[in-house]
Amino acid sequence: MSKSASSNAGGQVRPKSGRPEVPMATAKNWLREMMLIREFELRCMQAYQDKKIGGFCHVYIGQEAVAVGTIAATEARDPIVTAYRDHGHALARGMSPNHCMAEMFGRVGGCAKGKGGSMHMFDRDNNLFGGHGIVGAQIPLGVGLAFATKYEDEVINAQKTGGKSNRVTLAFLGDGALNQGSVHEAMNLAGLFDLPVIIICENNGYSMGTSITRGTTMGHQISAKAEAYGMEGVEIDGMDVIETYWAMKELVEKVRATSRPIFVDMRCYRFKGHSMSDPRKYRTREEEERYEQGDPIGVLKAQLELRGLTEDDHKEIQREVRATVKSAIDWAEQSPFPPTSDLYRDVYREKWGPYTGSSDPEMLGGAENDCKFNAIDTTIDRKADLL
Amino acid sequence: MSIATMREIEFRDAVREAMSEEMRRDIRVMLIGEEVAQYNGAYKVSRGMLDEFGPRRVIDTPISESGFAGMAIGAAMMGLRPIVEFMSWSFSLVAADPILNNAPKMLYMSGGQFGCPIVFRGNDGAGGQLGSTHSWSVEGLFSNVPGMKMVIPSNPYDAKGLMKTAIRDDDPVFFLESERLLSMRGEVPEEEYLIPFGQARIARAGTDCTIVAFGRMVNIALEVATELEKENISCEILDMRTIRPLDAASIIRSVKRTGVCVVVDQSWSFGSPGSEVAALVHRECFDDLDNYVHRVHSADVPAPYAHNLEQEYLPNARRIAEAVRSSLYRS
Ligand SMILES: Cc1ncc(C[n+]2csc(CCOP(=O)(O)OP(=O)(O)O)c2C)c(N)n1
Ligand SMILES: [Mg+2]
């Protein structure tokens, strides 16, 4: 049995008492979202076996409470960026399961027109700035998103906002990613520049087959690393969506008010293998079972049963999410493969002549979404006090 | 250029004027890098910019190329238009992941949703006896990546006009300055002008041999051409200005007239802009060529420190002249 298991047992971080009650409808909605993600991922696993999904595919089963609870604590205008285990974040942020599944299937109806795949989910409308495949790379980007919101609020729109930053970026990473150099550079920059970002380490105890104690110093208390960068480090029980929500709500409000970064050690566990081809030899079945008893969906269901959720209600939600995911699969399957002309689209913003060795190169497709390209409204007041 | 009020300024001033003018024009533009603000720039390119624009738009960073390049890319995804100064392109290698894996691919991977209007700039090339770690010419290494644009000016006028275009461009631009050129003086008009990408300049007209050159190499080729005139050799020199996009049409037009082509590219020869030009010319001008394309590159070794070795390492006047004579069967 790996040592990390005992140091990272799901549910060991006790929920704080004295939290207000979440309205039943809201909590039920979270249950639905978590069950939707679970169902989505189970069907992805099947579709992967059926070779409908290619490449690397990392499912989020076991960690649903993290995406749902953290994102519920944000506003839609708050940017989000994450790693390659990103389907849950995309769905929790409001991406249609159809577009998400179509991306998995490499179809033109996918959120990135089939150019990104499982690890690279992007959604402009929902302020999801990607899924990123290189471990840790999204943290400098996330710190940059926070830099930009602060710059926009405090420099460009200073007159409108009273010079006060008011958006919060969530930047997610895994516990293994915490050993990537660029993450530490980015944390230093976030601390140095007072950037409104919450760096959420989804600490599921493993990076592929390496338990946190084998790869990370202070693995029992990674929030200690935050201190070195002048930011607060907080531990949250990521197996309990209600606790995750309240704890995050507090942090989001704090960052909105102070424009100071915060680091979160989000305790969780991934129930399945790292990717589709992982026999999980590095951990015991007993350990897995122990965590499965703290299944975040089961935990929330039990909490809601105390407030009157019935077995029929639960079955109804199950039916609903099954139907949603089934139709997402149908939708994805009906979405065409990208036309081969798409190969040359979106490389540059303008049409471009790829170097073909010709004096008169064929001009190939630029990007379509001109108006959506710049998140920042350029019609804004330019006379803001720049200093 | 129409009648304009000319002044003579340094290359570094030209780059700074371009940045400052664009920052006055567009509040989304900001400058970030090591020592760019309080120190006025390690090479004084950003001198005075902190005073004019303040610390929110001219931003000193710690020595974290990967961190601040990635941060600037995130900001560009949100719609800011950062200019990132690398003290030297040699130091950009520790930021290879953000500048190669994120910036040029974001638009494509997101299906057109997020782009990266960003400029990376800094010193490129050997010549200052800095030894191998500090003497990178990144042209060959980086221009391999689709989704980016690469600019390599040879003089102050071009540096200013190209930098303004770079800042307004919606795609990531790699702007290669040369520390050897920063103090070069040249005429630059007071009036605003922009130079489009992908349009080579005929730095010297000639009839016998086309020399295709990039950046600082243009100036060395010009010296060689003056010398070769004494041998009755008339060289036409193309200053390519940008490597991506590459102005294939100008190269082909010139070589079809001269029938002879020499490429001068300070990066290593293997898989380089020079080899790309050679492939292009061999394919498009096959029947017009009197000789195979001769290429002058840095020697295929790490950059040495010793002055004499470094001079021999870089494309120099002697090697360029030899290539021209050889391609004309005059050696
Ligand atoms: C720079 C880099 N190195 C290695 C990999 C291969 N890789 C992908 S995921 C992963 C493990 C990361 O674990 P963690 O950060 O804990 O995230 P989790 O998978 O647990 O969500 C590795 C080694 C990669 N994608 N990028
Ligand atoms: Mg992990």
Image (cartoon, rainbow, N blue to C red):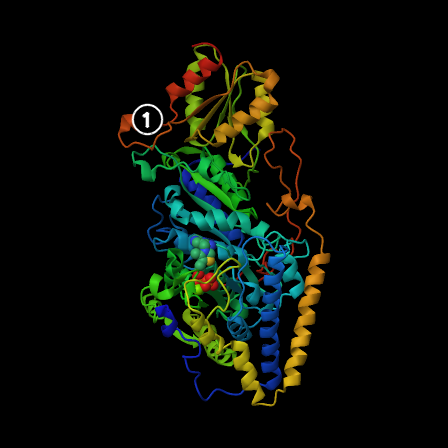
Marked residue chain, label 1: B
Q: Between residue B234 and residue A138, name the one nearer to us.
A: A138
Quadrant in the picture for the N terminus of chain A: bottom left
Give the image location of residue B198, x and y in percent. 57, 35
The answer to whether residue A56 is visible is yes
Q: Residue furthest right?
A: A334
The answer to whether residue A174 is visible is no
Give the image location of residue A190, x and y in percent. 40, 63
Measured along the vertical axis of the image, is residue A35 above or below residue B112?
below
Residue plotted at (36% across, 61% down): A188
Q: Between residue B245 and residue A335, name the one nearer to us.
A: A335
Label 1: how many Cα within 10 Å (few below 14, some 14–19, many 20+):
some
Measured along the vertical axis of the image, is residue A42 above or below residue B274?
below
Instruction: Name the residue beneath numbered marker 1.
Output: B311
Q: Between residue A38 and residue A115, name the one nearer to us.
A: A38
- Which quadrant of the frame does ligand 1 lie within? bottom left
Give the image location of residue B153, x and y in percent. 47, 35
Q: Name which quarter of the figure residue A110 lies in.
A: bottom right
Quadrant in the picture for the C terminus of chain A: bottom left
Residue plotted at (61% across, 62% down): A46
Going by the image, does A50 lie left or right of A205? right
How many numbered marks, from 0 up? 1
Q: Secondary structure at mark 1?
A: helix
Going by the image, does B49 lie left or right of A217? right
